[in-house]
Image (cartoon, rainbow, N blue to C red):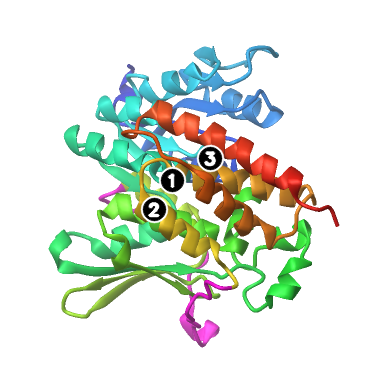
Amino acid sequence: MDGENANRIGVAILGSTGSVGRQVLDVIDALPDRFRVVALAARGRSPLFQQQVSRYRPEVAAVADQEGPDLIGAGALVTSTEGLVAAATHPEVDIVVVATSGHDAISPTIRAIELGKTIALANKETLVCAGEIIMPLAAASKTVIRPVDSEHSAIWQAIGTSSPDEISRLLLTASGGPFRTMSMAEMAGVTARQALAHPTWSMGGKITVDSATLMNKGLEVIEAHWLFGMPYDKIDVVVHPDSVVHSIVEFVDGSQIAQLGLPDMRVPIQYALTYPERLPRQGKRLDLATIGALRFEQPDEDRFPALRLARQAGLAGGTYPTVLSAADDEAVAAFLEDVIAFTDVAGIVSDVLDRHTPSGPLTLDAICAADQWARGTARDIIDSLPRS
Ligand code: MG
């Protein structure tokens, strides 16, 4: 390692071409003396990934596809799913940013934790599906899992140095999505295009639809349970359409501490990278006087049943959260292809959960098997629905 690199924190980005991955690179670009990109991983050899590899010249560039043009500028090119492991475990990597979608990163994340690397977690499935496996491992290897998601970052920041027995409740805020005020009948007719127009956050397609159904918030409740070791009955959701208060922690003395800011993922990303320090950052600042008022309301679980389903799956534990997430994935894909109605998504997830028979203790194999089963079952249900 040369002198210039010795003082910089080595970063691996799993999922560097996605929405979060690109914003991680924005944050690193603004702090070139502090961070160095050691490994980049993406699903395929897109022009964007080639641009990233040429620009950052990582020690490892990893792609899932075996065939395709060479990536110019990479120290080493690793193909197949082993690529994620190579990126996450490279000896010069200090922080692994897990920003892939789906389950692919669960096993590389476990490998990185075993090596004591710091995890900056932006992937939902890792804790939703495997929190029961990952959190004990992280505790055993004294690995800190730093949340990147804005709500969990807010809770993490609000908790600060407080001890667990000082916390009485976590309050996750939800924007409520674009259909917050619609009736069930109106929601039944919404299109994929309408669902993709998120009022406050700009994100990928799947997560934007999940925000509209509130499934995203349900998955975040499960993540919060694992990240902060909170029982489900002490994790609440409050709808906050302004997306300014990113979440709240209530303490045993009744005080509530919230973290506020404009909706910009680069803020929680930077904090996850620089923790425990806070570094200056350019950008617009929240101006509460201009906003004038902040709105909060109770989530309506009759119109947004995904929230209740997620809580039930979380409480049931084992492979139930995996089934929830996989069935939702298939249902959202079918909605985005205009095959099912928006309001069918939660019903399909509910049916798949009802049909699930859990197996023995939770293992990665059990998670994969439950995922495959849930996807197949969801597709069978989707195929059996009457076409409008
Ligand atoms: Mg979030």
Which residue matches tag 1?
A: 320
Question: Which quarter of the rendered picture does the C terminus lie within?
Answer: bottom right
Where residue 99 appears, x then y in whole percent? 49, 39
Q: Is residue 329 visible?
A: yes
Question: Which quarter of the rendered picture does the N terminus lie within?
Answer: top left
Q: CA distance from mark 2 to mark 3?
A: 27 Å
Packing grade of label 1 (10 A; few <14, some 14-19, many >=20) is many
Tag 2 near tag 1, CB within 8 Å: yes
Q: Earlier in the sequence, mark 1 or mark 3?
A: 3
Which residue matches tag 2?
A: 314
Give yes or no for residue 345 being in the magenta stretch: no
Q: Does mark 1's beta carbon lie closer than 8 Å to ligand 1?
A: no
Q: Residue furthest right?
A: 388
Q: As displayed, is residue 311 above or below residue 79?
A: below
Query: What amino acid is at disc 2?
Result: Gly
User: Which of these two is toward me, 359 or 285?
Assistant: 359
Query: What amino acid is at disc 1?
Result: Tyr
Q: Residue at x 49, y 85 (%)?
A: 289
Packing grade of label 3 (10 A; few <14, some 14-19, many >=20) is many
Q: CA distance from mark 2 to mark 1?
A: 7 Å
In this image, 56 relative to 96: left or right? right
Mainly helix, strand or loop, the magenta region?
loop
Q: Image quarter for residue 158? A: bottom left
Give yes or no for residue 294 being in the magenta stretch: yes
Which residue matches tag 3?
A: 21
User: Which of these two is toward me, 200 or 340?
Assistant: 340
Q: Earlier in the sequence, mark 2 or mark 3?
A: 3
- Residue segment shown in magenta: 275-302
